[in-house]
Image (tube, rainbow, N blue to C red):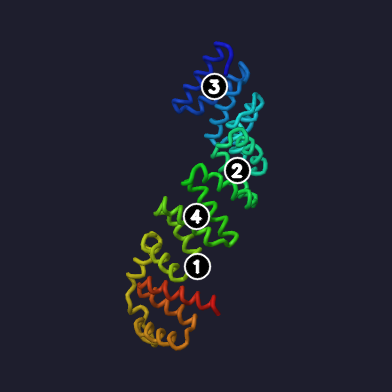
């Protein structure tokens, strides 16, 4: 904290500018304060936070490192680690985040960012330990739940991945990316029936699917009529051939015909069945 009365008054003006949202003016005032009276830990921390808000991460790092010279604490180490993460210097960020946790074992944000750093350098075991620790303190943390789902999927632990995906969807049922990821896991688990159900559900709520459905339904059916017959005749013929030969290529053709007719649920079912046949054979 600034020592002299004049220095304290100047510091108070800096804080007031900060509270008024005048970030650039506050930065200038802090810089002048340091030039005139020298720094102090709280000054460097405040200035570093303002630099970070303006995405001036190199300046923020210098300011937080200066704060650290005035004494260690968990917040300063966390700030340094978080800025280094922003600068994509993940290996240098980890020791500072570790120091923050050592000084405050319940500093959940430091554990979370440390997990993200380990993920970035492909240290899957350490990342998983961090994210699991986060969930001990913060069971509904979406970042940790999502990260653990991805980690378990990476190592082909699909059932465990599904547990975390379902936990995310219980908290955020409208999360379409996670719904798509869930469908992907079902497919990798060869749970084709549930996969079809999941894809249909996504189709009914995803705007990109709905737009395509609307487009397909505007096409006149006679557009698909040629010397081999109309679209309905082609579907009937392909169904007979599929029944006789169980051939994946005919299933794909049948899927396409249903898609062109605007029957996207049926198209999905035949496409998945064709894919399943290819996996089996």
In this rendering, which labeled residue sits more in front, label 3 or label 4? Answer: 4
- Mark number for residue 164? 4
Which residue is labeled 1 in the image? Answer: 187
How many numbered discs, if any? Answer: 4
Residue 1 lies, in percent from the top left, at: 57, 19
CA distance separating discs 2 and 4:
20 Å
Note whether 140 is above or below 17 in the view shown.
below
Label 4 vs label 1, nearer the camera: 4
> Cβ–Cβ below 8 Å for labels 2 and 4?
no
Q: Is mark 2 on a helix, strand or loop?
A: helix
Chain-order first, disc 2 or disc 4: 2
**Residue 62 relative to residue 21: left or right:** right
Q: Mark 3 points at which residue?
A: 29
Q: Do the residues labelled 2 and 1 touch (CB within 8 Å)?
A: no
- Specify which label sits upstream in the sequence, 3 or 4: 3
Residue drawn where x is 47% and y is 23% of the image: 17
Residue 76, placed above or below residue 273: above
Q: In the figure, 11 relative to 263: above or below? A: above
Please provide percent x and percent y for residue 63: 61, 29
**Tag shown at residue 114:** 2
The residues bearing labels 3 and 2 have C-alpha atoms spaced at a distance of: 33 Å
Residue displayed at 54% across by 44% down: 134
Residue in the foreground of this view, choosing between 215 and 168: 168
Residue at 34% from the left image edge and 72% from the top image edge: 219
């Amino acid at each position: 904290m600034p020592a002299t009365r004049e220095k304290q008054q100047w510091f108070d003006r800096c804080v007031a500018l900060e509270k008024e949202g005048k970030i650039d003016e506050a930065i200038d005032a802090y810089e002048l304060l340091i030039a005139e009276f020298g720094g102090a830990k709280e000054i460097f921390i405040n200035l570093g936070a303002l630099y970070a808000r303006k995405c001036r991460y190199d300046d923020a790092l210098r300011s937080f490192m200066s704060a650290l010279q005035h004494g260690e604490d968990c917040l300063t180490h966390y700030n340094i680690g978080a800025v280094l993460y922003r600068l994509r210097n993940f290996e240098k960020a980890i020791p500072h985040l570790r120091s923050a946790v050592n000084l405050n074992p319940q500093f959940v944000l430091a554990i979370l960012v440390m997990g993200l750093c380990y993920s970035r350098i492909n240290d899957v075991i350490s990342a998983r330990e961090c994210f699991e620790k986060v969930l001990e303190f913060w069971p509904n943390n979406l970042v940790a739940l999502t990260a653990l789902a991805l980690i378990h999927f990476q190592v082909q632990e699909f059932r465990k991945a599904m547990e975390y995906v379902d936990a995310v969807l219980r908290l955020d049922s409208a999360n379409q990316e996670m719904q798509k990821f869930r469908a992907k896991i079902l497919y990798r688990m060869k749970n084709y029936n549930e996969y079809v159900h999941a894809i249909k559900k996504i189709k009914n709520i995803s705007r990109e699917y709905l737009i395509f459905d609307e487009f397909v339904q505007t096409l006149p059916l006679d557009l698909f009529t040629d010397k081999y017959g109309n679209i309905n005749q082609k579907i009937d013929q392909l169904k007979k051939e599929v029944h006789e030969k169980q051939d994946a290529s005919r299933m794909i053709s049948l899927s396409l015909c249903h898609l062109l007719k605007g029957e996207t649920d049926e198209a999905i079912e035949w496409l998945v069945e064709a894919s399943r046949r290819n996996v089996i054979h």
